Image: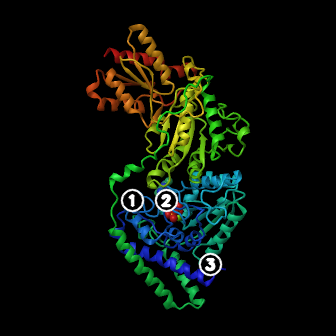
Amino acid sequence: MPTAAELLAAHRAFATARAMSDLYEANARLTSKYVHATSRGHEAIQFAAGRLLREQDYLSAYYRDDSLLLACGMTPKELMLQLFAKADDPFSGGRTYYSHPSLKRSGMPRIPHQSSATGMQAIPAAGCALGIQYREQRGLAHEVAGDGAPPVVLLSIGDAAMTEGEVSEALHMIALRQLPIVVLVQDNEWDISAHASEIRFGDALTLAAAYPGIEAFGIDGADTEAALDAMDRAFTTVRTARRPVLVHARVPLLGHHTSGVRREWYRHDLEEHRSRDPLPRLERRLVELGIAPEELARVRDEAARAVAADFEAAAAAPEPRGEALAAHFLAPSPITEERGERTPAGGEPTLMVDCALHAMGELLEDHPEALLYGQDVGARLGGVFREAATLAARFSDERVFNTPIQEAFIIGSTAGMSATGLRPIVEVQFADYLWPGLNQLFTELSRSYFLSNGQWPIHSVIRVPIGAYGSGGPYHSSSIESVLSAIRGIKVAYPSNGADLKGLLKAAFYDPNPVVVLEHKGLYWSKLPGTEAARCIEPDRAYAVPLGVARTVQAGDAATVVTYGRGVYWALEAAAREEEATGRRVEVIDLRSIVPLDFEAVAASVRRTHRVLVVTEEPASPSFAQALAGRVASELFQDLDAPPAAVGSLESPAIPLNEGLERFVLNSAERTGAALRRLLDF
Ligand SMILES: Cc1ncc(C[n+]2csc(CCOP(=O)(O)OP(=O)(O)O)c2C)c(N)n1
Ligand SMILES: [Mg+2]
């Protein structure tokens, strides 16, 4: 049972949160400039959870958690700096909404960035708990020791968000791995204007029953004593027994859904919800315990005065400057130039797939915080391309492991893993299956560094076999680099040979940004005619190729052919035929990275050759290749003797299965050669 002192502390906290939401409401014209939601009605359960978080813990909060943030130690003024999106907003420097926390501050729980997309924080939070578990299994010290007790993750989430698909992936992994996480579901029965009765059966407890091993219980989350007891119980269990607990807290929603969606438009149940308001209920209880009503009123007045002063100060605080934004687009990489030996004396010609395997082995040897996971990469198979063969046996099943078919989890969990100081390398089995994970890549990973104002860069290497090879058919052949190239905040590598793959994997590993490494299946074993050069001397252990640095594969002056991946071989073959036929020698540039793009290398070449062709395996229109050709046209118009062109595969929705149809659709040395001839003859 909570003591009277604890209840008085809760009362002070509720009074502060309530004074803030009253103030926001009273100044709606000012405060609704930027959309915000408040915890009004949810104060008790949020206070009960937030007060238990320690310095070594991780918090994954959602947009209604302002009482939780106050309970962790944030000040009202700091939250109001967010409300007004000011420069000194401690979470994002004015980049993101109220109560969307990101924080890495000593003495406070660690709060990795999370998006405003409901439910999407569940996978990164589960990844965080997986990271904590991994460190404990491997005897690695936690990033923050705190008071020495084992860390806990708190995942806070709304009732409607619990029905989302990605939440199921997270719950599944939480149950399967018995992760040290408290899942707090704040059930106010509302999903904006959709009521629980029309959008879900049962509640989070019904759902949790399907996940054995997650201890789940429900409480009245507006009963302060019950809330304090429940969160004590949940945190103690997770902290000591190292297994998950889900708390389903029924709470009233007393404020608006958000400042922009007002309760009076559609709420029919406000009276009933008001009858459960935790603040007067707690006050009645405190009076029963002998506290004078005047004393409670004094606390409320004091809170109102304090937050009014903070409100004035926050409203008057300086605005952020646009010039400061660029500092946190991408985190600086330590690999800025090519290093190590690309062709060491005595080096062996090595298949591309083995260059990658050796890179993995070296990284796992050198870095205890490195780990590799994905579908079928574990000991039994070692990857469907044998690209991870032997690694689990060498480094243990804890460091190299199979995941379920959960691309969202595979990609999204790296955000949490990285937050615990680990360096995850993951695999998506085929580029065609990146889509279920694309949401995590875009929504959570790509924006973390920027929206946390540089506090939370994400180390995440995502290996993705890509491209058409040997009748892989429509779901094992797709090229997807254009979509990836349009996501700001990530990097994308696309090597064409084993040496670059090894060097780029190393650079990707050390890069503090999410990096997708696209690995062409047809080049893995150099089985495609004309791709023998993908098998090359293996670089040494120290070798690294910076992301965003192209390589001239063949020098020439008649035109510049810019390409990457398998396109390099089409380009070289077409170039050789052209030279043989007409004596015109073209320059071939292998970009090696799609993002960042080495436009300087392209421009320097085009200034000499005055003509450019971009070669891709994707249909060319629209594509990354076409955009590059367009950029050359607009930036180097004066240098050009012919319109820049892009050539790719047929404009087809998918690569068909039949061998002849596949050939018909795909780009080729012939098709590339014809485009080159047109360019040269222009
Ligand atoms: C993926 C996604 N879809 C839609 C929205 C718009 N949206 C914002 S809040 C909300 C309702 C969420 O309800 P619940 O999870 O119960 O949280 P509550 O606001 O009730 O606390 C929706 C649909 C969103 N933010 N993210
Ligand atoms: Mg709700």
Residue type highlighted by circle 2: Ser
Tag 2 and tag 3, C-beta contact below 8 Å:
no
Tell me the CA gap for discs 2 and 3: 29 Å
Give the labeled residue for mark 2: 102
Q: How many marks?
A: 3
Mark 3 surroundings within 10 Å by alpha-carbon count, few (fewer than 14), some (14 through 19), many (20 or more): many
Judged by depth in the image, the label closer to the viewer, 2 or 3, is 2
Quadrant into which the N terminus falls: bottom right
In the image, 547 versus 613, the foreground residue is 547
Is residue 536 visible from the viewing direction of this image?
Answer: yes
Q: In this view, does 442 lie above or below 288?
A: above
Q: Is residue 528 left or right of residue 665?
A: right
Above or below residue 308? Residue 557 is above
**In the picture, which quadrant includes the C terminus?**
top left
Pointer 3 residue: 225
Q: Could you give the CA–CA distance between mark 3 and mark 1, rounded to whole angstroms?
A: 36 Å
* Residue marked by disc 1: 94
Of residues 330 and 627, the one drawn nearer to the viewer in this rendering: 330
Q: First in sequence, mark 1 or 2: give its number.
A: 1
- Residue at position x 35%, y 29% in the image: 603
